[in-house]
Amino acid sequence: MKHRLGIVFALGVGLFGQASALAQPAPATGADQADAPAPPPSPNPDAPPPPPPPGEPTGTPEPPPPVALPPYLTGNTTTPLNPPPPPPPAPGQATTLTPPGPGADAGVTPKTAPARVRWRGTNFNFGTNATTTALGLGRDNIGSEGEQVSMGFGLVLNYFVLEPKLADGTPRGYSFRVQTAPGFDVELTNSDFTSTKREPLFRDLPIQGIFSKPLWKSANEEWGLSMAANGTVLLPTSKLSYDRGVYVTTSPRVSLFGQIPLRGKDAEFLKNFLVGASVRWDHQFTRATVPTNPDIQRPRQTLQGTVSMSDQLTGGSIDTNSLRTGAFLFFDEKLFDHTLWIFVSGGLQYSFLNQPQVSECVSISTGCVDPTRVESPTTTRYTTSFGVGVSYFPAAEWGFSIDYGNASTQIGLNGKRRNPLYGPDATLSASLILSLDAIYERLTGPARDEPFIVFGSNKNTRGVPQSARREVLF
């Protein structure tokens, strides 16, 4: 430090002495002519340039550049004395105002950022569902037995367990998350299923582990292919599944997603859309191959004419194994500077029925007889599904959705094939979605700039078994 201060002091003394010498008056003419001439002064590299000779044009000299002292003279090791100005923005690039810091004036746009919490995608939803016939749409029914209006309450809990990032903080692309969606419904019309008025009907509880990974992307990032592997276990928390003797359902699923450009990523609208296909296999672990309930004992007459008590509810087989295939079309747009999602989906379910095991001889009071059988029994039940809907988020914290869905068996009660787009049990739904994670980020800051919603539906569908409920997962 002493050495540095000495350099500074020496420079100051030298400059002061030179200025004092230049300020002294010139000696009188003819004085001290006998003395020897003084040696010429040594050139000073820091002296200003000499004035131009007479007759040459004079111009305004350029101002010297700002002095940037080294950090060891200023004491500041982070910011120079005269910081260089920022570079001008590139042509066509809009400048962004920096959000104010502490103490700045109020009334400015708060700072926003992408979704950052690991439990993003967690939301609460409330909706009203109604069959189209209850709203006066579709065919005219004789009676109102098939009409239904209900309210539904659901909670989607989502958590990213694995989302690795590169050294610069950008995500690698693949992730693993766990998710569950508890919920219940309350029927507002005259229910033919519940034993009490306004009885809450809980849905089956899914426990899901989802691994997502991009597979390929084009050089211009307009084409892409990704996949999602979903391992799901359904717990029989619904009244229908529990009463039918279902213990648990395993449901592995695989989905492929393709991003296809429309007008290009630089377009203001219709940039691209997402198309995909999915397949899943459900296996139910049940008490029997037919619906049973140990709390109900019904007297039944055997082939021998005797009476015995049975817990069997119906003679229909439980679809222990089922295969579901689906396809969907999905894209998002900006409407009034906010996010609008539109999707269309369709699917076909193959339910494989259990075949009864009957011996060749049935003993009755008159002897042994060979029971008759159906020549070509039904071994597979087909169920079609169709859905279309829109979701709009005026803010990242909340939004609403309106969707239409239809799921019905292939053959109707009249023995004819049903229209896969519409059936007597088609439903209209309107839901309000509250993003709990976005609300948390709004309160703690910075707020989220875009909504992050895991699209899914865990609803019962009228007219089909609980195991065939409509689920749309993207």
Image (cartoon, rainbow, N blue to C red):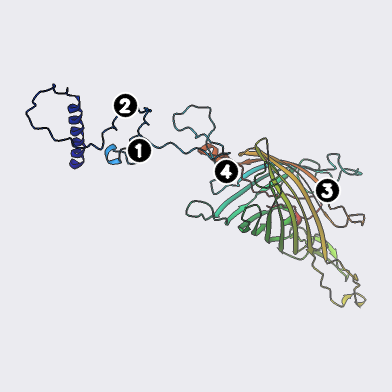
Q: Secondary structure at mark 3?
A: loop
The nearer-to-camera label among 2 and 1 is 2
| Residue 462 disc label | none
Pointer 3: what residue?
425
Secondary structure beneath disc 4? helix
Q: Nearer the viewer, mark 3 or mark 2?
A: 2
Residue neighbourhood size for the residue with mark 2, other residues' Cα within 10 Å, grouped as few (<14), some (14–19), many (≥20)? few
Figure quadrant of the N terminus: top left
Q: Is residue 97 above or below residue 217?
A: above
Q: Confirm whether residue 197 shows in the render.
A: no
* Mark 4 or 3, nearer chain start: 3
- Say whether disc 1 or disc 3 marks the residue closer to the N-terminus: 1
Q: Alpha carbon of mark 4 to alpha carbon of mark 3: how far?
A: 35 Å
* Residue occupied by mark 1: 80
Label 4 and label 2: CA atoms lie apart by 79 Å
Residue 437: mark in rendering: 4
Tell me which amino acid carries mark 1: Pro
Residue in front for this viewpoint, 134 or 16: 16
The type of residue carrying mark 4 is Asp
Mark 2 and mark 1: Cα distance apart in space: 42 Å
Mark 2, residue position? 54
